[in-house]
Amino acid sequence: MPLTPDSQTPDSRLSSSHITRHVFLIACTLLLPGCMKYQETLEIEKDGRGRATLLITLPSRAASESATLKQIEERLAPDPLASGIRRQIHRRQTESATELEIAYSFEDIASFCAWAAQTSSPLNNLSVVRDGRHVEITRRFSGISSGDLPSVATAQFDIPVTFSLRAPYEIDVHNGTLVNGNTVTWEFSARDLLAGSGKTLAARYRVRPSYWLYVFAALLALAAGIVWVRRSRKGRLPTPKMERA
């Protein structure tokens, strides 16, 4: 679905499967305080197509166990995929760290959000709404009470979490940390996301009208007017000359 006026995706908020739960349950399992990183990037085009990338970095000594990577993939890459959604999974390893990248490409942002809302994907709290000349994109994260996680989770609270959003419009308002062109970035420690009732990440983009369309329409109207004048002149009969007797 292109980002047309008054279009919106479902307000998808699941109480038990937000990214904070994914990241921290994995961290608690690995017992690796301060060694994990989570990055997420969302890119949306004017026609509704786009790409979402989840990147999690783990110490190589933990990621060397195939069971660990399998567990992470199951949490961050649920099956089955819906029509129009493709997914690629890449692993990159160095001496000190292993990166697991899960990249989605989709043909329709509304369908993608609807699919994510019905799964355990960290993207299940994504909402995209266009109203008039604005597009608003939000992510709502619920907080986690201390009873939801083992006591060892307190050692994982400083895990850095980064979200980046790019849309093909001019940024109007946002509550992000950094802005570069039409890209908004949020940077948190997981402690920030867990605090209180959680956080809402929001960015509103301003959709400016395409003035080239108005120029083209004006030129087309001018050309039509010229053609009409010329045809009307050709259709006139010549005025007979009066001769003197």
Image (cartoon, grey):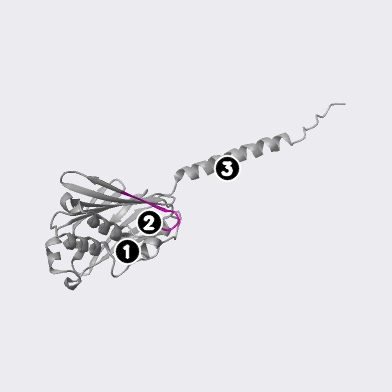
Question: How many numbered dots are placed on residues in this image?
Answer: 3
Residue 131 appears in the picture as rendered: no
For marks 1 and 2, the one nearer the N-term is 1
Give coordinates of residue 125: x percent, y percent.
32, 63
The kind of residue tagged 1 is Ser
Task: Give yes or no for residue 88 being in the magenta stretch.
Answer: yes
Distance from the alpha carbon under mark 3 to that under mark 2: 32 Å
When asked about the image quadrant of residue 35, the answer is bottom left
| Part of the protein shown in magenta | 81-89
Distance from the alpha carbon under mark 1 to that under mark 2: 26 Å
Dot 2: within a 10 Å radius of its alpha carbon, few (fewer than 14), some, or many (20 or more) residues?
Answer: many
Determine whether the residue tagged by mark 3 lies in a helix, strand or loop.
helix
Does 40 sit above or below residue 199?
above
The kind of residue tagged 3 is Ala
Does 96 sit above or below residue 118?
above
Residue 92 appears in the picture as rendered: yes
For marks 3 and 2, the one nearer the N-term is 2
Residue at which label 2 appears:
135
Determine whether the residue tagged by mark 2 lies in a helix, strand or loop.
strand
| Disc nearest the viewer among 1 and 3 | 1
Residue at which label 3 appears:
221
Residue at the bottom extreme of this rendering: 147
In-image side of 50 versus 213 (left or right)? left
Give coordinates of residue 157: x percent, y percent.
15, 61
Residue at which label 1 appears:
120
Dot 1: within a 10 Å radius of its alpha carbon, few (fewer than 14), some, or many (20 or more) residues?
Answer: many
